[in-house]
């Protein structure tokens, strides 16, 4: 599904960017430009970030 129409970025691409380590909308934008145009997709990007963060295991050092 197309999420960012300014730069033709799909949810699949966004999930890959997030799984590769992007942890906020600025980092997502740096990698694939999504969210850096009109900003209409920022809410959906934030939802995808939230979904991923909820299932990411917590790693404690020490």
Image (tube, grey):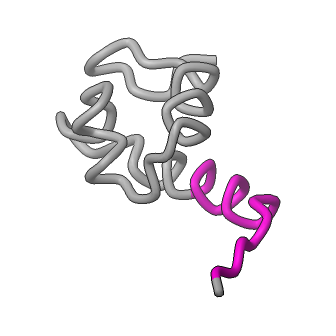
Q: Residue at x 81, y 59 (%)?
A: 55
Q: Residue furthest left?
A: 37
44 lies above or below 14:
below
Classify 25 as above or below 50: above
Q: Quadrant of residue 24?
A: bottom left
Q: Considering the whole magenta stretch, tell me its main secondary structure.
A: helix
Query: Where is residue 57 shown, x and y percent of the image?
Result: 79, 64
Q: Identify the residue at the far front of this view.
A: 62
Give 57 or 33, whichever is nearer the viewer: 57
Instruction: Please state the extent of the stretch shown in magenta in the rendering.
Output: 47-61
Residue occupying the point 30% across, 30% down: 31
Query: Which image quadrant: the N terminus?
Result: top right
Q: Tell me residue 29's x, y (percent).
A: 27, 39
Q: Is residue 2 above or below residue 55?
A: above
Going by the picture, which residue comes out furthest to the bottom?
A: 62
In which quarter of the view is residue 11 placed? top right
Based on the picture, tell me whether residue 17 belongs to the magenta stretch: no
Q: Position of residue 58 (x, y in %)?
A: 74, 73
Q: Residue at x 61, y 56 (%)?
A: 47
- 62 relative to 42 in the view: left or right: right
- Front in this rendered view, residue 54 or 56: 56
Query: Is 61 displayed left or right of 55 in the figure?
Result: left
Query: Residue 20, image x and y in percent?
Result: 53, 36
Tell whether position 50 is magenta: yes
From the image, which quarter does the C terminus lie in?
bottom right
Res 41 quadrant in image: top left
Task: Judge by depth and name the residue closer to the eye, 52 or 11.
Answer: 52
């Amino acid at each position: 599904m197309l999420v960012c129409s300014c730069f033709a970025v799909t949810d699949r691409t966004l999930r890959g960017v997030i799984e590769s380590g992007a942890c906020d909308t600025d980092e997502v934008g740096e990698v694939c430009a999504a969210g850096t145009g009109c900003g209409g997709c920022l809410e959906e990007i934030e939802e995808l970030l939230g979904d991923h963060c909820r299932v990411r295991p917590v790693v404690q050092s020490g």
